[in-house]
Image (spheres, rainbow, N blue to C red):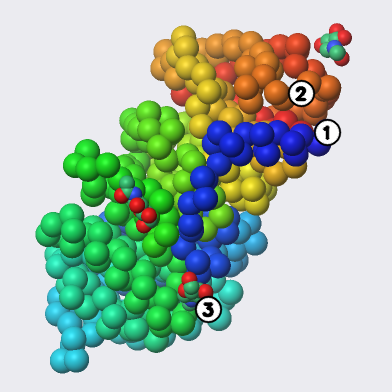
Amino acid sequence: MDYAWLSVLLGTVLWPQGAQSLQNGLALTPPMGWLHWERFLCETNCERNPKNCISEQLFMDMADKMVSEGWLDAGYQYLCIDDCWLAPERDEKNRLQADPVRFPGGIKKLADYVHSRGLLLGIYEDVGSKTCEGFPGSQGYYDIDAQTFAEWGVDLLKFDGCYYGTLDKLEDGYRQMSMALNRTGRKIVLSCEWPLYERGIKKINYSEVAEYCNSWRNFGDITDSWGSVKAVMDLSSAVQEEIVPVAGPGSWNDPDMLVIGNFGLSWNQQVTQMALWSIMAAPLMMSNDLRDIPAESKALLQDKNVISINQDPLGAQGYRVFKADYFEVWERPLIKGSLAVAVTNRNEIGGPRNFLLSLSLLWEDRVCQNSCFITQLLPSFQKYGHLNDTSLLSLWINPSGTILLRID
Ligand SMILES: *[C@@H]1O[C@H](CO)[C@@H](O)[C@H](O)[C@H]1NC(C)=O
Ligand SMILES: *[C@@H]1O[C@H](CO)[C@@H](O)[C@H](O)[C@H]1NC(C)=O
Ligand SMILES: *[C@@H]1O[C@H](CO)[C@@H](O)[C@H](O)[C@H]1NC(C)=O
């Protein structure tokens, strides 16, 4: 079935209205990789916790695992350092330097190691005077820092917003760093937190954010809990009319890291995070320990069918279309008129509940008009076959679980 005309039609309603994305040719699909923050935080005591402290050894371990355990092949390419990699002071030429004890080879050597394995390296800084954990910030040093990152061979910058001073300085700092990175000539993905620090204080100009950033956080940090994953779903759907239209190739809303494979989510909740992050066209940045991850979490994170929803080249972000009786239905338009659909059971008591999915509910009743092919991707792969828009699909969904479908 070819529903290409539908995306043209929907384009007038939901697609970016001529929003200009950052012209660096990067992140044409949501960036995928690994980021240390949620799992490893700011552990700087390598004597007490040698395997898990923020050190070059941790990133070399993860680089090795990303290659040997199929993560790179599945698309996870960016290995990203978060806060706490820095020495407490800049050097005599005002350049940033890595902590000399925990990163004895320096970032350049780590970048070379990461690149030699076919991966890309991400690093962290802050638009303000200090990073969130109190290390030197970039304020006043945007050009020097951009140049330093480029010389080291950095490929992505996560740019936080702590200690920004005033909102004018925050905005100016994001613009300046984006332009400074451009002037280095090195292709560096810029992951911002600009809207997160403005939300609730002023109306966010998302077209401008998209002009300077490849992705941006809208809400606070995720934690290893179902409550946190639910909050991201609720916050994202509450402002979907504001944030969905600006997403597209090179410009992504970032609902923060995947916490799959850690301690806080049940199997069904892990399925829900993977399904919804794919529907939301979210950057897939895992924060977990690749040296020790349950086999089922690994299989979920490496599921090629689900990843292909996340990485769909149309780059349209999905949104919630229905919420009632503790069920939520989300849909995401895909290339060539296909559609991804997630149905979540938000009830947290009892057993599997039945949801009769009326296909006429989807895509403003414009899907499956002459029958289409339905495949279930999560929680397990299953073909339902051809259905038309008068069909009802009977789904049994576990508490806090999700069924992810693709409709072609
Ligand atoms: C810098 O910006 C220009 C114009 O937007 C763009 O053509 C160029 O590719 C950018 N360079 C880098 C390295 O991002
Ligand atoms: C938002 O930013 C864009 C691009 O920088 C600008 O043209 C526009 O005037 C801004 N809109 C508002 C309401 O400030
Ligand atoms: C739609 O499917 C139902 C069975 O699910 C079938 O009875 C009906 O004839 C089909 N309608 C069309 C227009 O194909």
CB under 8 Å between callouts 2 and 1? yes
Q: Nearer the viewer, residue 178 or 350?
A: 178
CB under 8 Å between callouts 1 and 3? no
Are there few (<14), some (14-19), or many (20+) residues within 10 Å of tag 3? some
Name the residue: 15% across, 92% down: 92
Disc 1 or 3, which lies upstream in sequence? Answer: 1
Name the residue: 72% across, 25% down: 367
Return the x and y of residue 134 as percentages of the image width and height: 14, 64
Mark 3: C-beta under 8 Å from nearest atom of ligand 1? no
Which residue is labeled 2 in the image?
368
Q: Quadrant of the C terminus?
A: top right
Mark drawn on residue 115 = 3
Could you tell me how far apart the alpha carbons at marks 2 and 3 are, in whole angstroms? Answer: 45 Å
**Which dot, 2 or 3, sits closer to the camera?**
2
Mark drawn on residue 1 = 1
Residue 292 visible in the displayed image: no
Mark drawn on residue 191 = none
**Which dot, 1 or 3, sits closer to the camera?**
1
Type of amino acid under label 3 = His
Return the x and y of residue 180 as percentages of the image width and height: 34, 76
- Left or right relative to 337: residue 252: left
Name the residue: 72% across, 31% down: 407
Residue 321 visible in the displayed image: yes
Could you tell me how far apart the alpha carbons at marks 1 and 3 are, in whole angstroms? Answer: 41 Å
Are there few (<14), some (14-19), or many (20+) residues within 10 Å of tag 2? many
How many numbered dots are placed on residues in this image? Answer: 3
Disc 2 or 3, which lies upstream in sequence? Answer: 3
Quarter of the rendered image showing ligand 3: top right
Return the x and y of residue 328 as percentages of the image width and height: 50, 20
Secondary element under disc 1, as helix, strand or loop, is loop
Type of amino acid under label 1 = Met
- Tell me if residue 207 comes above or below residue 9 in the rendering: below
